[in-house]
């Protein structure tokens, strides 16, 4: 798989937007020891990765060891299982290889963040559900006040829940549009800068 120029530009912008321990200069060399990939994962999903398992490396053996650990502890669980050939290519800084991995990793990170968000929403809804049921039964909430209405009907509750779901969906759509517009603006800024400097 090869990435076209617009996907590469977007990928490089994404990497440059992250606070990594070293700046991107020659990407295949900068990422050859796997440390920056571990940092990217930790940036978005800190609960999945321990950075102390990955140390900067110059020797090929140490680089391979970092990649093998990363593959075993995280990448393979996401369906990004790296073969020995790919690990060798990444460790040797084979051009074009790291970009494809980062592109796929970004998609998997987005999926994980979406699952995490849905899980949090479900937890919130469950909490709202429990409190509403407590209201309906006329119980004390937080032992501090009595419910205003002891007879909230199931119909009202379902309507409120549906409105909440609809609003959440609208928010997600708007957030996706904002992200897309921000991306387009970044690309335009880059093109303007390129035209200005030439």
Image (tube, helix red, strand yellow):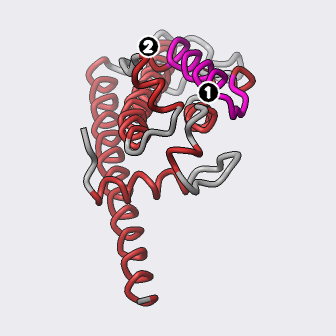
Give the side of residue 100 with respect to residue 72, left or right: left
**Height in image: 27 above or below 65?**
below
Q: What residue is disc 2 on?
A: 77
Q: Nearer the viewer, residue 154 or 77?
A: 77
Residue 62 falls in which quadrant of the image?
Answer: top right
Q: Is residue 198 visible?
A: yes
Give the side of residue 132 with respect to residue 157, left or right: right
Question: What is the crowding at mark 1: few (fewer than 14 residues within 10 Å), some, or many (at least 20)?
Answer: few
Q: CA distance from mark 2 to mark 1?
A: 25 Å
Give the side of residue 97 with respect to residue 64, left or right: left
- Residues in magenta, as a range: 54-74
Residue 97 falls in which quadrant of the image?
Answer: top left
**Height in image: 20 above or below 47?**
below
Q: Residue at x 47, y 25 (%)?
A: 88
Give how far across and how far down residue 17 sits, in percent: 55, 56
Give how far across and how far down residue 149 sits, in percent: 47, 24
Q: What residue is disc 1 on?
A: 60
**Dot placed on the residue nearer the N-terminal end, 2 or 1:** 1
Q: Quadrant of the C terminus?
A: bottom left
The chief SS type of the magenta part is helix
Callout 1: helix, strand or loop? helix
């Amino acid at each position: 798989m090869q990435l076209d120029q617009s996907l590469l530009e977007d990928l490089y912008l994404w990497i440059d937007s992250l606070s990594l321990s070293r700046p991107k200069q020659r990407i295949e060399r900068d990422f050859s020891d796997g440390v920056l990939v571990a940092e990217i994962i930790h940036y978005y999903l800190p609960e999945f990765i321990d950075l102390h398992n990955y140390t900067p490396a110059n020797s090929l053996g140490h680089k391979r060891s970092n990649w093998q650990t990363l593959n075993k502890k995280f990448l393979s669980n996401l369906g990004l299982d790296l073969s020995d050939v790919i690990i060798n290519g990444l460790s040797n800084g084979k051009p074009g290889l790291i970009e494809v991995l980062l592109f796929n990793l970004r998609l998997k990170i987005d999926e994980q963040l979406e699952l995490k968000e849905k899980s949090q929403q479900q937890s919130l809804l469950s909490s709202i559900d429990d409190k509403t049921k407590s209201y309906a039964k006329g119980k004390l909430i937080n032992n501090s006040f009595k419910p205003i209405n002891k007879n909230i009907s199931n119909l009202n509750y379902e309507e409120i829940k549906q409105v909440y779901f609809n609003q959440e969906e609208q928010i997600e759509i708007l957030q996706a549009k904002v992200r897309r517009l921000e991306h387009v603006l970044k690309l335009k800024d880059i093109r303007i800068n390129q035209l200005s400097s030439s």
